[in-house]
Image (cartoon, rainbow, N blue to C red):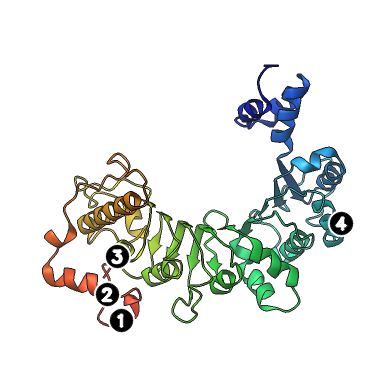
Amino acid sequence: MERLPTEVLINIVSYIKNRKTLVSLRQVDKAISRSAARGLFRRVVFRLGHSHSSTGLEALSSSDYALLVRHIDFKPRSLFKEREGYEYSLIEGDIVERIPPLLAKFVNLNTANIWPCEWDSEPFEAWLPRVLESVAKPQLRRLTRLHFPIDGSCYLTHCLNSDHHAKVKKLIRQIEHLSLHSRVNDNPHLQGLDTLLETAANLSSLNIGGFCEVFELSVGDIDCSQLLRLKSLELNFVFISSYELLGLLERCKDTIRFVKVDSVSLTKGSWLHVLMQSKNNLKLLDIHLFNWEISLNKELKNRGDIWLDHGFFRRDYKLICLALGELQRQINANRHAEGLNRWPKKKFRSLGFLPLQFIMEKGRYTELISQSWDAEKDDSYHSDSE
């Protein structure tokens, strides 16, 4: 072990996630101790409501290990989970003044994760504004990843539309990877996505998930195609219309290369429309659709109603399979043009399906491929879900 290069030791230790094991490794020789310290202090958890957490953060920020911190989690504590030995306060009143100087010492910090409150907790207005201001105030230049609770999207929009939150605006402008998440089964509404996308000019990846509804996304009202440079879009457990989904993709059609749609329910519109528009207008290099295997040999009729909840598959299930095959073949053509290897059938299972035009009724196929991105607003458009 003594002869191993430092880079190899760091790589080996990076696979160890258990904190107790990392603490034990720090008792070994200096080389392994240094590598273990990188894993141990790479991620810091600040538990709102625990006075001990504030003390620990202060001690860490004053040590040499502050340079190792890359990721910080802000976790609000439930009112109903008090434990003996902890002085409870959901968030200290002077956090906006005390936390920023500490965060400023984490000069290599690149990720901030603000978790949503646990159930039966204080509303986000009691803590989220002060946490967001605390993260924005130090103006950490390397902070490019932000995980933000969907419950706070309304407040974030307020900040971006206000002249009194310049540091929050600056923070959002430098974010490259944004994840919007919520508690399981919370079903919040994601508000102000238009404003957020207009402000986040450097955004390259967007992840939205957690049983939320995306609505009132004014895809046709504001032209921000020059501002969006998304390369990756992931939607997980999201309710959205085909018009809003395609409108979001249209804004970044010159740069988007990866799309993941997992357990997404179309509130209105057609998966056939989404798949064919993606094939004809995007230059995707990879795609992941649905959390279940599509196969022409399997029927949906014996499955539970959950599949309806995940997006209107029942009526045109086989046609959706064929449309997915067309999109996968187009993606492989895009990869070949970029000098990349084509995806094999083991990954793209619909590659061998017949072209949609050979199976679909001619008039309906002609209507499908002639539809525009915003076909949902066209009175002549008929949803597959009807």
**Residue 361 location (% of width, % of height):** 12, 66
Which residue is rendered at x = 72% and y = 45% of the image? 45
- Disc 4 marks a residue whose amino acid type is Arg
The image's mark for residue 371 is 2
Q: Which residue is mark 3?
A: 280
Which residue has dot 4 on it? Answer: 98
- Local crowd at mark 3 within 10 Å, few (<14), some, or many (≥20)? few
Q: Residue at x 24, y 48 (%)?
A: 351
Image quarter (top left, top right, bottom left or bottom right) of the N terminus:
top right
Circle 1: residue type: Asp
Comes first in the chain, label 1 or label 4: 4
Q: Amino acid at mark 2?
A: Gln
Q: Where does residue 50 sit, x and y in percent of width and height? A: 80, 48
> Is residue 344 shown left or right of residue 94?
left
Q: Earlier in the sequence, mark 3 or mark 1?
A: 3
Residue placed under numbered mark 1 in the picture: 378
As measured in the structure, the alpha-carbon distance from the residue carrying label 3 to the one carrying label 2 is: 11 Å
Please tell me whether mark 3 or mark 2 is closer to you in this view.
Answer: 3
Depth check, mark 2 against mark 4: the one in front is 2
Q: Quadrant of residue 147?
A: bottom right
Judged left or right of residue 205, residue 220 is: left
Q: Nearer the viewer, residue 215 or 274?
A: 274
Q: CA distance from mark 1 to mark 4?
A: 54 Å
Q: Who is closer to the viewer here, 202 or 309?
A: 202
In 3D space, how far apart are the residues under numbered discs 3 and 4 (Cα atoms)? 53 Å
Q: Is residue 191 visible?
A: no
Q: Secondary structure at mark 2?
A: loop
Q: Residue at x 72, y 23 (%)?
A: 32
Q: Secondary structure at mark 3?
A: helix
Q: Are marks 1 and 2 in contact (CB under 8 Å)?
A: yes
